[in-house]
């Protein structure tokens, strides 16, 4: 994909110290990445801080991006998720589990239709579809909203051990299915 | 996790990418990735596998001034040669350097409350990311470092440690690739003396304080947010 090749090229330029390239990455990706941070932190100020932290990391670590290992979009998404997860851990993630809006939307089964716009999404959707409902919900809550094991357990009103093993089984099934 | 089965390693990587690990477990994965290429590869593979899920997340426009904030935080490009990205030259080093240098002179007025045996060789003011002075750091000729919390009247950044966390003091000499831990700070802000730090203070050494899990950084490098920072300068003659 041209967009992907562009992003990978921009990251290479960022690694050599090109600020304009970082600005171009921001221009292309900031609404997607801010959405990712918002889904985890659910607070604009905290999400903005996390995105700022993430872009400083991109500036420092762009040289670690290796296009042979995966797409630039995925790498950027993970840098932002890690920054948001760190912020959520620092403030204590439990505040979020009471939010009644949490999980409406992204974890609804119909939302998976949004995955069908790209080939890798179609495959992931098919593989998620093969999981039991509970492991699928646990994985989506964790990934999209950044919930920890205990938080997923609390939200799903299930014992921690059960939820951990659902998520592990789910991950193994996904890996097998996507292989 | 030496001796872990491939499935264990892969699940650990999967849970790391998924985000369900706690801060300590997550930091441990990041540390292990440096010495276990198979783990790093597994993390990359899970990032690739799960990334399509980000398309489920609604996009959202960041605050309009965010790019300006990010750009202001980048290190100033060196004039006349292509900019480079040294790993530890973070934006705030430069900002902190400028702020620290200008505050250093002002802070000497406040030094009277610090009893000291001898004139320091080097000093700096550690500031928070809001540029509020919070600590005064001094190094003496024998290599000892003294840290004193600035009185609340001096600024609004009175150091306080959240429960279950500890503030860790680091030093980074010019040319070092990563900072060296100097001490864990006591919970109650006050005065801390480190008689024989593992590295000898030198001019331009960066001093920083990060927030770490109880017991200190599990990785040997700062893992939490940098709360305060400053750069040692030669103490002015008086």
Image: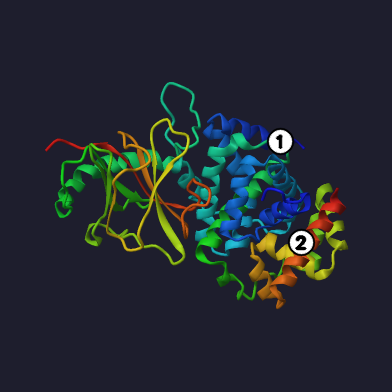
Which residue appears at 30% of the width and 60% of the height? B189
For the N terminus of chain A, give its image quadrant: top right
The answer to whether any part of residue A157 appears in the image is yes
In this picture, is A110 found above or below B72?
A: below
What SS does tag 2 mark? helix
The image shows residue B112 at horizontal and vertical percentages of 14, 52
Left or right: residue A165 versus residue A78 is right
Instruction: Using the image as rendered, state which of residue B120 and residue B231 is in the foreground.
Output: B120
Which residue appears at 68% of the width and 61% of the height? A144
**Callout in the foreground (1, 2):** 2
Which residue appears at 64% of the width and 70% of the height? A150
Pointer 1: what residue?
A67
The image shows residue A119 at horizontal and vertical percentages of 84, 47
Instruction: Using the image as rendered, state which of residue B52 and residue B188 is in the foreground.
Output: B188
Q: Neighbour class for label 2 at 10 Å: few (<14), some, many (≥20)?
A: some
Q: Earlier in the sequence, mark 1 or mark 2?
A: 1
Q: CA distance from mark 1 to mark 2?
A: 28 Å
The image shows residue A174 at horizontal and vertical percentages of 82, 56
Left or right: residue B187 versus residue A7 is left
Q: Neighbour class for label 1 at 10 Å: few (<14), some, many (≥20)?
A: some
Q: Which mark is residue B224?
A: none
The image shows residue A27 at horizontal and vertical percentages of 59, 43
Q: Which mark is residue A168?
A: 2
Chain containing mark 2: A
In this picture, is A97 found above or below B160?
A: below
């Amino acid at each position: 994909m041209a967009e992907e090749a562009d992003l990978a090229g921009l990251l290479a330029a960022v690694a050599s110290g090109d600020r304009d390239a970082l600005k171009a990455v921001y221009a292309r990706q900031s609404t997607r990445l801010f959405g990712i941070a918002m889904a985890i932190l659910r607070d604009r100020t905290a999400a903005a801080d996390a995105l700022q932290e993430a872009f400083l990391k991109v500036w420092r670590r762009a040289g670690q991006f290796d296009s042979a290992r995966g797409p630039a979009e995925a790498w950027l998404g993970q840098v932002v998720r890690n920054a948001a997860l760190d912020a959520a851990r620092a403030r204590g993630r439990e505040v979020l589990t009471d939010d009644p809006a949490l999980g409406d939307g992204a974890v609804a089964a119909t939302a998976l239709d949004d995955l069908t716009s790209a080939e890798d999404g179609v495959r992931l959707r098919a593989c998620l579809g093969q999981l039991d409902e509970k492991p699928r919900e646990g994985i989506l809550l964790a990934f999209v909203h950044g919930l920890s094991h205990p938080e997923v357990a609390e939200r799903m009103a299930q014992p921690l051990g059960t939820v951990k093993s659902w998520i592990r089984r789910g991950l193994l099934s996904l890996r097998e299915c996507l292989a | 996790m030496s001796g872990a089965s491939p499935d264990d390693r892969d699940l650990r990587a999967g849970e790391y990418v998924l985000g369900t690990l706690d801060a300590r477990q997550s930091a441990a994965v990041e540390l292990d990735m440096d010495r276990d290429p198979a783990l790093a590869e597994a993390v990359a593979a899970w990032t690739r596998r799960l990334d399509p899920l980000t398309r489920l997340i609604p996009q959202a426009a960041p605050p309009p001034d965010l790019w300006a904030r990010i750009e202001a935080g980048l290190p100033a490009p060196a004039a006349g040669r292509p900019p480079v990205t040294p790993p530890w030259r973070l934006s705030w080093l430069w900002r902190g350097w400028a702020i620290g240098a200008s505050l250093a002179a002002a802070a000497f007025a406040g030094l009277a409350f610090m009893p000291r045996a001898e004139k320091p060789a080097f000093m700096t003011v550690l500031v928070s990311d809001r540029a509020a002075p919070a600590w005064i750091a001094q190094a003496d000729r024998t290599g000892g470092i003294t840290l004193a919390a600035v009185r609340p009247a001096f600024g609004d950044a009175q150091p306080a440690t959240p429960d279950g966390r500890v503030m860790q003091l680091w030093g980074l000499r010019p040319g070092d690739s990563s900072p060296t831990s100097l001490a864990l700070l006591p919970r109650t802000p006050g005065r801390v003396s480190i008689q024989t730090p593992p590295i000898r203070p030198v001019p331009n050494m960066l001093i920083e304080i990060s927030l770490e899990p109880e017991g200190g950084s599990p990785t040997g490098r700062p893992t939490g947010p940098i709360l305060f920072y400053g750069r040692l300068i030669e103490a002015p003659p008086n």
